[in-house]
Image (cartoon, helix red, strand yellow):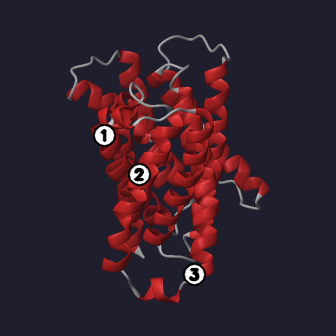
Amino acid sequence: MKKQKFLNPLFLFFAAFIWGTAFAAQSAGMEYIGPFTFSALRSFIGSLFLLPFIWIFKKKDNAKSKISDNIKGGFVCGLALCAAANLQQTALLYASVGKSGFLTALYIIIVPVIGVFLGKKLNAKLCIASLCALAGLYLLCMKTNQMKLEFGDILLLLCAVAFSIHILAIDHYTQKVNGITLSCIQFFVCGAISAFLMFAFETPSLPAIADARLPLLYVGIFSSGIAYTFQIIGQKGLNPVVASLIMSLESVISAIAGWVILGQTLSGREIAGCAVMFLAILIAQI
């Protein structure tokens, strides 16, 4: 139990780390292909990447889990992930990166609110941690104090709701099924629905997809195949509010990566935001 309490947050931190460093690749891919095309291809890549690992890491708990539970869990999580991923990807066409990071991470507030309606009790300490994290995100992501609600912002708010549902769905199904199998199925579902939307609303071309191959491979393998699987493994037995707080470090890691790798400077306001975010995680973990 003590080992699990240590490893679960670590898995979630690595997931946040990958998402934070993969954001540039996600944005770069949009220069060549549309949001539905990008979501469909990254999801299929993630699903194919995980197929051999289902066999390699097949364990007793995988044998005991019902096939119907795996399919049902993968379908529900895939629907939520599809909505969140496509809303976020489309919003990148309209909203700034900073505002996108802030509004998407509002799931740290939405998760405990939805949890109340599902019969989960509110923890005062976690509520304080969530509010601290929200304040830190605002300082980090919002360069100005203006918050005008635009079309891209509405998409991001809906994205935050979808990610919240995804987190709670994983919290429910991860107790019943194998994490790698669940992740593989959810990506296939997400990819299939995104592919339908791709052909309905976009005109994908092979040359454009070839130009976006590096961002697609990076995001498909690392951000989808590895990071989302880490999320499922890390959330098992962990309070979903705590999980959402750890995963919100994606924004902090993205800012630090830009500072270290790209030489982008961090203002005092942004450094304060990072500090407040880390404080929030400490409050949740202690």
Q: Residue at x 53, y 49 (%)?
A: 244
Is residue 134 in view from this perspective? no
- Amino acid tagged 1: Arg
The answer to whether residue 207 is left or right of residue 63 is left
Q: Residue at x 43, y 69 (%)?
A: 180
User: Which disc number belongs to residue 67?
Assistant: 3
**Label 3 environment density (alpha carbons within 10 Å; few <14, some 14–19, many ≥20):** few
**The residue tagged with tag 1: helix, strand or loop?**
helix
In space, the residues marked 3 and 2 are separated at their CA atoms by: 23 Å
Quadrant of the image occupied by residue 216: top left
Residue that mark 2 sits on = 224
Residue that mark 1 sits on = 213
In space, the residues marked 1 and 2 are separated at their CA atoms by: 15 Å
Q: Earlier in the sequence, mark 3 or mark 2?
A: 3
Horizontal and vertical percent position of residue 192: 56, 54
**The residue tagged with tag 3: helix, strand or loop?**
helix
Horizontal and vertical percent position of residue 54: 38, 75
Q: Earlier in the sequence, mark 1 or mark 2?
A: 1
